[in-house]
Image (cartoon, rainbow, N blue to C red):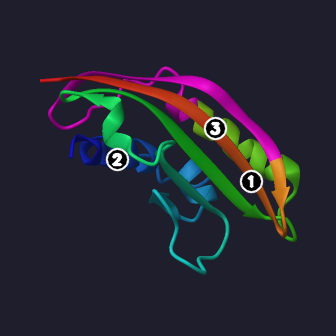
Amino acid sequence: MPHLNIYAGLYTLLTADQTAGSFYDDLTGRIYPTQAVVGEDLPLCTFGFSSDSPDKYFTGNDVDATLQVSIWMDSEIHSPEDIVAVNDKLVAILEDATPTFTAHSCGQIRSIDTGVLDRQEQAWVIQTLWTVTATAD
């Protein structure tokens, strides 16, 4: 399943900077591929391909897929400005990134939609969409 290499590369990209004030630090390290652990505390981030069958976006072993990244923060603790600031850090990491994916070269990430703030029950959420491409080695 070639998409597992892409998940691993994206996770590495999102968690590379763990210094104070980083994207990782703002989310207290809660960054999950596909979905968070049930009952996990906020804030957190999930990322995954925005399709029910990610393999259909892999032609041979090449990748041309749409990635969805969601950031969640407790609206009782955090302001809308707080989640927008974290989303700005996400955009800085991903926009025009050229990540390394195992068994792939020429990895590229481009924004489709850099997010709209929404409130769902007691949480702020911003969901962003990205095009991820890579060529199989």
Q: Which residue is mark 2?
A: 7
Seen from the viewer's position, the closer of residues 21 and 135 is 135
Res 77 quadrant in image: bottom right
Q: Is residue 22 visible?
A: no
Q: Residue at x 37, y 42 (%)?
A: 54
Instruction: Please tell me whether mark 2 sits on a helix, a strand or a loop.
Output: helix
Which residues are drawn in magenta? 92-117
Res 73 quadrant in image: bottom right
Residue 63 vs 115, above or below: the answer is above
Q: Which residue is mark 3?
A: 128
Mark 2 residue crowding within 10 angstroms, few (<14) / some (14–19) / many (20+): some
**Which is nearer the N-term, disc 3 or disc 2?**
2
Residue 125, numbered label: 1
Q: State the CA–CA distance, disc 1 to disc 3.
A: 10 Å
Seen from the viewer's position, the closer of residues 77 and 20 is 77
Mark 1 residue crowding within 10 angstroms, few (<14) / some (14–19) / many (20+): many
